Amino acid sequence: MNSSISSIYNRGKVVTPIENKLSFQTDELDLHLFETKVKTSGFALAFDEISLITMLSGKKVMHFNKEDSFEFLPEESLVLDKKQGMNIDFPEAEYDNPTRCLALIISPDEIKETLMQLNESAPKIDHTEWTVDSSTLKFTNNQLLNNNIERIIMLASSNSEYRDALGKLMTKELIINLLQSKARDFLLEKTDSLAGNNQLAFAIEYIRKNQDRQLTVEEVAEKAHMSKSTFYRYFKRHTGSTPNEFILSEKIKQAKYLLANTSQSVSEIGFALAFASSSQFIKHFKSITGLTPFKFKQSSDALLR
């Protein structure tokens, strides 16, 4: 959470024994910023319309029924149906280390309008319609969604004369990014079951099974029975990254696993994952993780001791 958003929390709040709340409105959405500074459990909450719930700092444990409970961490989100009740635990909240989250209550008319535009201009590859499926399944925000949420917070809390006009554009962008994030997570998690009848799922599975080779976009597109340009466009739309970015990220994910769980050297792992040289492997690994492979392995070894 950036410093500008942190400063917003220092403004006046509605203070309750458990939750401090700060609210802002535009024509398209209501924004509620919540802050909890004491450990507590069983806090009940529900909203009257479809809502996006996003964690900003700290940890919650969400309870929707006896069988559906999970930890809720920063940069994770939920889209909840109207009047969807929940009970929340705050196991780590403290005065100097508050748990913070936001709730965006989105206009039903804006959701309907955006879905109609998407289904007309950017249909899904499997020809099913875009819908906002509310559920109690959390998903991880991508960078676009994180940036979108931060800009909405800054705009909604401002006094800009263009706030409502910009708010409409940002809300539409938020809905699209939400749909993309949920579709991406579903696609990436269910590739095994979807690969038989979904071209993108097949392509993702092919990439994951061929990390020991230098794959090209042309090869993967051909395996998915799509032209390079069509494959590139649909892949970026549904996953939020280009095919080359995804190929690299999957190799780095596998490299992290091998560094943490095997005795293979950095050069052996780079070779096994088809990097042209150890220096290229190290460069790409650091650009994505912020650490060299050696430093990452050291930190992993320290955690296991």
Image: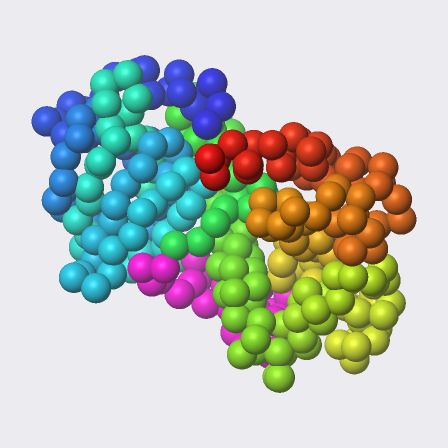
> Left or right of 291: which side holds 16?
left
> Where in the figure is residue 88, as x and y percent of width and height?
20, 44
Q: Nearer the viewer, residue 84 or 265?
A: 265
Task: Name the residue located 14 percent from the left edge and 35 percent from the top edge.
Answer: 40
Horizontal side of 60 relative to 236 (left or right) equals: left
| Residue 156 horizontal side relative to residue 147, left or right | left
Q: Residue at x 78, y 56 (%)?
A: 272
Depth order, front residue of 19/191: 191
The stretch of residues the image draws in magenta is 110-137
Q: Is residue 193 visible?
A: yes
Q: Nearer the viewer, residue 163 or 100?
A: 100
Question: In the figure, 109 relative to 73: above or below?
Answer: below
Left or right: 223 in relation to 55: right
Q: Is residue 249 visible?
A: no
- How far from the left and from the top, in percent, is residue 199? 68, 76
Residue found at x 55% / y 46%: 142
Q: Residue 170: percent from the left, percent from the top? A: 52, 42
Which residue is located at x 80 percent, y 44 percent? Answer: 267
Q: Is residue 115 magenta?
A: yes
Q: Is residue 210 above or below residue 149?
A: below
Residue at the far right in the pictured view: 276
Colour scheme shown: rainbow
In the rendered image, residue 3, in percent from the top left (x then y), is placed at 47, 18
Q: Residue furthest left?
A: 17
